[in-house]
Amino acid sequence: MRNEEMLLIPGPTPVVDSIYDAMSSETRGHTDSRFVAIYKHAIEQTRELLKTDGEVFVISGSGTVAMEMALVNTVAAGERLLIISHGYFGDRFIKLAKAFGIEIDVLQAEWGQQVASEEVEKKLGEHTYKAVTVTHADTSTGVAADLDCLVPLIKKHGALVIVDGVCATAALEEDMSKEYGSPEYKIDIVLTGSQKAIGVPPGLAIVAFNQTALKAREALGHVPAYYCDIHNWIPIMQNPANYFATPPVNLIYAYEEGIKLVLAEGMDERIMRHAAFGRAVRTALREYGMTPLASEEVAASTLSCILYPEGLNDTEFRAALAQKGIIVAGALAHLAGKAFRIGHMGNTTEDMLAGAIRAIGEVLNDMGYEVEIDKAVLRFTEEVSVTNQ
Ligand SMILES: Cc1ncc(COP(=O)(O)O)c(C=O)c1O
């Protein structure tokens, strides 16, 4: 990898050379047949990844655009949305829904925990919801939602299931063909971005609608959007030679290569690899006296939010790590200064993470915390191989 630094924040994630190479291919016109073929392949691969019977949308924008696209095409002003939030990004749906006059109820977990399924069941029994949002892995807390539990609960009550996969797609299972206990109990929408577990630079909003979600769009008639109205994009996704808004040509090159790598590794492999990395990173950091915010039962495999030992200075710690070429992120909201977040997703490798564990140990020792680096690195390696068996 030609990267000079190890970008272990929870997205963007390290970009591999073949993706950079694809991205730096010659910029062509967006209706040039050579570009159109690549865009078409990128769309087909997205469909293959998410296994939807509906439409996928791959457009310019960040994850937030994908969130907006999911909501504005399915829930009208005055209709009711239930938001299941495991942190900062789950909460983002609150402001988004309010901006469109959508009525909301919110179930918020204490940071580091999941919303209890009993609470979800109770809420679903109290009102009729058009849709429910579930943040698959919340990037603020490192908590993953349990789709096996939530999808059937939500579908039993007839609501659309909207899964925010910004920090999960291509690492956690998001199979839109999967029947969660009954043939019609399926995920209706997955939304994501290019920059996390897919491992492509930021800039693409990716959304998949199944047939049920597409019917919901039809039933709405007019929606309060132009760029995010899927009606404007369906003709492009069906034939990328059509024009609606200029696609980010070079990012599409990069994404086509990124998804190719994802599919070549295979989702079963990737799910296992991410689970192994997540567990191993947290195990090693526990050796240093650090505490993951989320318990192993609910921890996301894509990133971890790690509480510092008493008295450790966040700014100094992260600056010292950066000096060693390892970039981790600060924590958000009330955890700022008290924890850091480390990404272990996408094209991150075992060697990179073992190097990060070693560097973290060195920084801790330099800051006066006596830790056993070799032991932690060994625990990391052991845990990766155990989980991989
Ligand atoms: C789970 C989740 N949802 C949504 C977003 C928003 O994505 P973006 O920053 O690309 O707009 C993020 C960003 O980190 C996220 O982690």
Image (cartoon, rainbow, N blue to C red):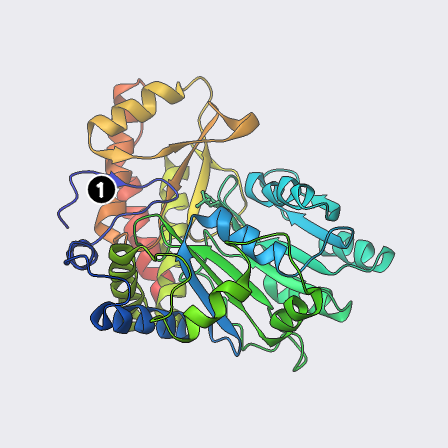
Quadrant of res 237: bottom left
In this rendered view, identify the residue nearer to me: 237 or 340.
237
Quadrant of res 47: bottom left
Residue under the point 60% across and 71% down:
214
- What is the x, y in percent for residue 325? 20, 33
Q: Is residue 220 left or right of residue 356?
A: right
Q: Is residue 71 left or right of residue 332?
A: right
Quadrant of res 87: top right
Q: Is residue 110 above or below residue 174?
A: above
- What is the x, y in percent for residue 56? 47, 69
**Quadrant for the C terminus in the image:** bottom left
Q: Is residue 205 above or below residue 328?
A: below
Q: Residue furthest bottom?
A: 183
Q: Residue furthest right?
A: 126
Q: Amino acid at mark 1?
A: Gly
In this rendered view, identify the residue nearer to me: 110 or 252.
252
How many marks overall?
1
Look at the image and tell me whether residue 370 can be seen.
no
- What is the x, y in percent for residue 99? 65, 41
Look at the image and tell me whether residue 220 can be seen.
yes
**Crowding near pointer 1: few (<14 within 10 Å), some, many (20+)?**
some
Q: Is residue 164 left or right of residue 349?
A: right
Residue hosting label 1 = 355
- What is the x, y in percent for residue 113? 62, 44
Q: Is residue 233 left or right of residue 347?
A: right
